[in-house]
Amino acid sequence: MLIRTAAALALITTTALAQQTDITIGMQLEPPNLDPTGGAAAAIDEVVYANLFEGLTRFGPDGSVQPALAQGWEVSDDGTVWTFTLHDGVTFHDGTTMDADDVVFSLDRARAEDSTNAQKALFADIESVEAVDPTTVRITLAAPNGNLGFNLAWGDAVIVAPESADTNATVPVGTGPFAFAQWVQGDRVELTAYADYWGEAPALTAATFKFISDPNAAFAAMMAGDLDAFPNFPAPETLSNFEADPRFTVIVGSTEGETILGINNANITDLKVRQAIGHAIDRQAIIDGAMFGYGTPIGTHFAPHNPDYVDLTAQSAFDPDKARTLLAEAGATDLTLRLMLPPPVYARRGGEIIASQLREVGIKTEVSNLEWAQWLEQVFRGKDFDLTIVSHTEPADINIYARPDYYFQYDNPEFQALIEQISITTDPAERSALLGQAQKTIADDAVNAYLFQLAKTGVADARIQGLWENAPTQANDLTGVTWSQ
């Protein structure tokens, strides 16, 4: 009797494990809205990218550009006409059909003069978008752009429907394998598997994204089993605890996140002052003190894992004496700068260290801790700041320096022409050389102080498989996630 009972218990346990098809994911930041085409916050894509919304193309876990709603495409010999063939039978979560007209609507909306898309520049080369038939879309470019497939893989380029586009911020309707269930603001977003998904159904039937801003609370929630995974874990100092616990897996990878001390170039116009700020900063001290050793020093706005990366860290090496000399030459002997910090740990902890390092060379700072919505309004949109710390997690985004109205307000016509040349260059060697020149230009101009490439440090239940190790874009893609027995 005892043997049969033990066997029965084992069977029940195994069955219970096999039946688990839901997951609870921890996130430090709550998205300000759920529309990736109408907001710049990375937290939006972390919830909806590939899960709820899809584009013509998408990023794979290795950073490759893969087919999504488009099953394939052809490019004209002169590189100006791209013809996409869509999957047939795709529906939005409200049951309406997704076809070529929705693609035309989405891309025209994203590139419109009054567009609120945070990455409107992705669509600048598009001259026209036409629906050839319900499953064929023709995109004509003003000039060749070999990066169009890459651009269309961004979360900002997902396909939305005219019927629901205006309410996607709070009630998102996409074509992905998961549909929106509810958003309990201040707590969580819930998704459920979409029964009529056009592609391969995910193994998961439900997903909850739980927002926990405090690192100590995140640690406690993982330990207590309230969360199944925290892909971007905010307390790297506790990772050793998880590594020692067989219940968990620690996942360390790379991201596209160039973490910078952003400088308002419209306020700090003197090159020597900006150079002094760079030389005042000890990158390794910030990596060790704020990120507990996780991070790679950078000297320009480019990911070190990219084959076209140029190591320019020596150009702005930690040199307090040089910083003081440059400040004296600039006549900036009594400088006070406003340092605006968003909520992420790298910003708050890193800000304390940077404020101390700047003080050592004679630069005073007035530190303000902002909530994410405040930061977006005051710093990103309002440009009302002197310094800020933020990680730019968008892939290969050095082209933001070609936008004079971007929040750090760098206006260099030569750089803008360089980025335009890169966009039409298809020869790999020539393109690599131009990208190297672009990296050096912004380093020479000390547009920002470049700190480190953000590491991806995640923690998950050891039974979970399929979470991304690296972050080629800001996403918690659950389409390939499964539970093992």
Image (cartoon, rainbow, N blue to C red):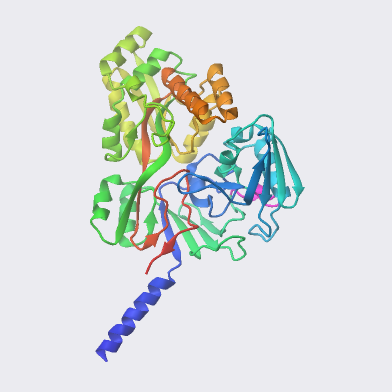
- Check the picture and name the quadrant holding the C terminus: bottom left
Can residue 384 be seen from the camera position used here? no
* Residue 265 position (above or below residue 68): above
316 with respect to 56 (left or right):
left
| Relative side of 427 to 274, left or right | right
Check the image and report above or below for 187 versus 378.
Answer: below
Whether the magenta-drawn stretch holds residue 377 is answered as no
Q: In x, y percent, where is residue 12?
A: 36, 79
Q: Residue at x 60, y 32 (%)?
A: 121
Residue pictured at 42% horizontal, 18% vertical: 444
Q: Which residues are magenta?
A: 160-169
Q: Is residue 310 above or below residue 104?
A: above
Of 350 and 57, which appears nearest the observer? 57
Q: Residue at x 50, y 53 (%)?
A: 185
- Whole-percent x and y of residue 254? 38, 42
Q: Count of labels shown?
A: 0
The image shows residue 282 at horizontal and vertical percentages of 28, 27
In-image side of 50 versus 484 (left or right): right
Q: Quadrant of the N terminus?
A: bottom left
Residue 7 makes an appearance in the image: yes
> Which residue is the extreme one toward the bottom?
1
The image quadrant of residue 173 is bottom right
Q: Is residue 235 left or right of residue 408?
A: left
| Rendered location of residue 207, percent (x, y) | 48, 60
- Dominant SS of magenta comes to loop
Q: Quadrant of residue 257?
A: top left
In the current view of this chain or complex, which residue is farthest to the right? 133
Q: Is residue 164 magenta?
A: yes
